[in-house]
Image: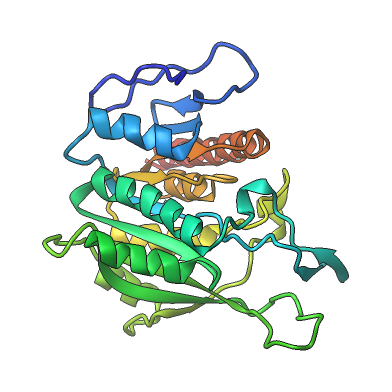
Amino acid sequence: MRYNMLQKSDSFPLVVMESSEYSPNQCAFKDNKLGVWLYHANCIEFMDMLIDKYPDGRFDMIFADPPYFLSNGGITCRAGKMVKVDKGQWDKSNGPEMNHEFNMAWLSRCQKLLKPNGTIWVSGTHHVIHSVGYAMQQLGIKILNDIIWQKPNPPPNLSCRYFTHSTETILWAAKNGKSKHCFNYADMRKINSGKQMKSVWTMTSPKKNEKEFGKHPTQKPVHLLERIILASTIEDSLIFDPFSGSSTTGVASVMLGRKFIGCELEAEFIKLSLKRLEIAIKEKMSSFDLTAVSK
């Protein structure tokens, strides 16, 4: 492996590559002041390295949006046109047994990297989420809730042989049965007009401005990640995303005053992430400046 070495400390003083290009297994971006680090790396290898350095766990929260394994010749509607479902080689199925083996591999590492009271959120469609849920049970991860993300604007079903797919499932789980997980109940009730928040969340897909620099095929809306982070962490918590994609988790973490570690294998999504993280950090720093002036 060609990783730069991590130093064991509270601040992750990681080394960024000197070249302007990103090669695998390198730190592609860092902001030590706000606590933002993005790696171009294979998540399994990267997590193995972190486990060696932090055997007792490191993260307060993990959000994972793993491959859905649905790029297998199907069709969908995009911008009013029929297109093949082909998100990339990383999304192709290797059969249910191999897919489940992969889910066990990355989930077991996430479990080890969670702090004792940390939680993990995993999103997916029916192609993957049942395997994820079963893997959690096998590993002794305690499932807390299954959130249904309902999309009011889903693409139509062109075959007219199925119901329109309009939801994704997000499993929220604690490291194990002994965990005393963080849940900011009062905050969730406040943003839900003073009522207990239910496990069905209606939110649109990413807005146009969230795709300004391009988009990831399974990109999540910032608002969704903001709610997840607000529900289960406090300020300065350290959040990890092993399948960082376009770094929506990182953007939401920055805006909410959390620290973020991301890992992404595809170079094109690293490039997209850098642009989004830079904008988010500029906006956050601007808000700091405005606060200082107002005082």
What is the quadrant of the C terminus in the image?
top left
Q: Residue 14 is drawn in which quadrant?
A: top left
Report the residue at 45% width, 21% height from top: 1
Residue 229 image offset from top left, x and y in percent: 38, 57
Left or right of 131 in this view: 83 = right
Image point 28% across, 19% down: which residue? 7
218 w.r.t. 114: above or below: below
Q: In the figure, 142 relative to 216: above or below?
A: below
The colour style of the image is rainbow
Instruction: Using residue 149 as the reference point, say whether residue 44 is left or right of it.
Output: left
Q: Please report the residue visible at 64 percent of the width from the left and 36 percent of the height from the top.
A: 275
Looking at the image, the residue that sits furthest to the right is 81
Q: Residue furthest top?
A: 18
Q: Is 196 drawn above or below residue 271 in the view shown?
A: below
In the picture, residue 100 is in which quadrant? Answer: bottom left
Who is closer to the viewer here, 197 or 47?
47
Count of numbered badges drawn on the protein:
0
Residue 159 is left or right of residue 218, and the answer is: right
Whole-percent x and y of residue 160? 79, 88
Please determine whether, in this image, residue 229 is positioned above or below residue 115.
below
Taking the image as shown, residue 75 lies to the left or right of residue 59, namely right
Residue 228 can be seen in this image = yes
